Amino acid sequence: MSASIPIPFSTSPNVAVSVSPTSTNIHERFRQPSGGLSLNVRLPKVLHPVDNEGLKLLLLENISQEAVKTFQAQGFTVDHSTKAMSEDELIAKISQYHAIGIRSKTKITEKVIKAASKLLVIGCFCIGTNQVDLHTASKAGIPVFNSPFSNSRSVAELVLSEVIALSRQYFERGYEMRQGIWNKQSKGCWEIRGKTLGIVGYGHIGSQLSVLAEAFGMRVLFHDVINIMPLGSARQVESLDALLAESDFITLHVPELPETMNMISTPQLAKMKQGAYLINNARGKVIDIPALIDALKSKHLAGAAIDVFPAEPGANGSPFDNQLNTWASALQSIPNVILTPHIGGSTEEAQRMIGEEVSSALVRYLNYGSTLGAVNFPEVDLRAITAEQGNHVRICHVHQNIPGVLRQVNEVLSPYNVEKQYSDSKGDIAYLMADIADVSPQDINRLRELISRTSANILTRLLA
Ligand SMILES: NC(=O)c1ccc[n+]([C@@H]2O[C@H](COP(=O)([O-])OP(=O)(O)OC[C@H]3O[C@@H](n4cnc5c(N)ncnc54)[C@H](O)[C@@H]3O)[C@@H](O)[C@H]2O)c1
């Protein structure tokens, strides 16, 4: 008999290694052709929905070709369009699809979801999900996936570039050169080495930035509402005021919440060092911009970089003017202010990461039932069924979150061996996953029918 030990560095919970005890010492073991380790790898079984119908996906708004390839590799049929669809167009077409991928322009409304008789899952190939009626989707048993953090690095890099640009005033100098003016100067231009960067919000972006800034020789302080283990030599300070008082650059990386609205206004600006800089790549409403304009005009601050605004144009080419934000021209007229059109996360790399992340979340849900990362659903997953567990079946049961459901479902499952089972709820919706051993092909449809008939059923899928 051989002892089975887990491989410590394996990411798969289903991989084990058998070590032969006949070898006398470790050197002899590794001299054997297989290195003495007989790899007894338990490969995961590839699951598929048991319905006969092949899965059909609709991808809109020019979602990346990598995503198309990922879906085609799974045997899904993919209809790809570079354009968004209107509500009416969607209502006419959506009933043939099991999944839809969109970016921010296509609106998945209640009417669209009601027309989507086969729809199992929605993928938002972007950061936000407010273009989807999340509540109606979850009530219809449809999880929604997005990619909230794929562009963290892109934002962090932009911020670091802005720290240098503000410090060296090169936006101003470059602008003057385009006007035909040569204006070489060093007054008020600084290296960033040895300066203090104050990060407000030490999450995905703030912490990435911390590492980049230290590599440039900056001292990094941060403030967050939760205690976070600092990276490198960064230090968490106890209050926003302490951060404002000590930093040469303040950069904001907080979500838009009632508590973060206008979190930097006249009193906070007054607490910043004379000649400091302010950077906002978070959300438009976290800074009181008229107050910032005053602080810049009085030369209390030496510059600012703003990528996000309380009101932003809906389309490229639209004006960014006083009609949109009453203070626009005042801000545009101040030197050493960098204004960018919400490009923090806009890089090819971020788009590719979004494509990979959302397409693999959709495949994991369609083929394996996992809702990890869903924004409107309880997050449930089970470890894989292995290749040798040929006649195991996975039950994915979305139901209303009311008492007595598990009793009904388990009654149906009671003649079988339930190998593993996990259930969780979020609001009105609950989701149960269960792996059942030794289910004959004849029993599969009967099982699905019986569970679908339970009183709180929203959707029951079987994967085998
Ligand atoms: N400019 C862009 O293109 C762009 C791109 C991506 C993200 N963003 C925005 O950047 C911001 C940060 O994104 P993230 O991915 O790092 O988010 P995150 O959720 O990973 O981190 C946010 C951090 O802020 C902290 N926080 C919350 N309230 C706070 C408060 N009142 N004071 C101090 N800290 C507080 C949280 O504890 C958390 O650590 C978000 O607003 C996001 O929408 C902008």
Image (cartoon, helix red, strand yellow):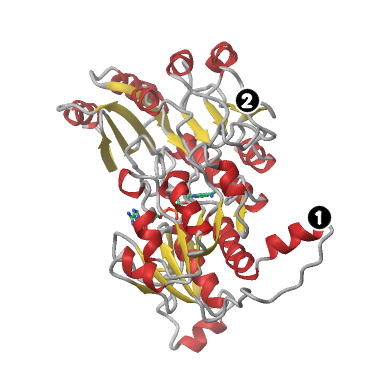
Q: Secondary structure at mark 1?
A: loop
Q: Is residue 395 above or below residue 262?
A: above
Q: Is residue 4 visible?
A: no
Q: Is mark 2 within 8 Å of ligand 1?
A: no
Q: Secondary structure at mark 2?
A: loop
Q: What is the x, y in percent for residue 435?
A: 34, 40
Residue depicted at 76% across the width and 59% down the height: 176
- Give the residue pinned by disc 2: 84
Q: Amino acid at mark 2?
A: Ala
Of 150 and 217, nearer the camera is 217
Looking at the image, tell me whether mark 2 or mark 1 is earlier in sequence order. Answer: 2
Decide: few, some or many residues near mark 2? Use Cα within 10 Å; few <14, some 14-19, many ≥20: some
Of 57 and 290, nearer the camera is 290
Q: What is the x, y in percent for residue 291?
A: 43, 51
- Position of the N terminus, as image quadrant, is bottom left
Q: What is the x, y in percent for residue 121?
A: 47, 30
Q: What is the x, y in percent for residue 205?
A: 48, 59
Residue depicted at 32% across the width and 28% down the height: 398
- Circle number at residue 303: none
- Give the residue pinned by disc 1: 179
Decide: few, some or many residues near mark 1? Use Cα within 10 Å; few <14, some 14-19, many ≥20: few
Left/right placement of residue 432 relative to residue 72 reads left
| Residue furthest front as drawn | 298
* Alpha carbon distance from label 2 to label 1: 40 Å
Q: Is mark 1 within 8 Å of ligand 1?
A: no
Left/right placement of residue 402 relative to residue 227 reads left
Q: Is residue 462 above or below residue 278?
A: above
Quadrant hosting residue 104 = top right
Left/right placement of residue 343 relative to residue 415 reads right
- Position of the C terminus, as image quadrant, is top left
Residue depicted at 25% across the width and 28% down the height: 428
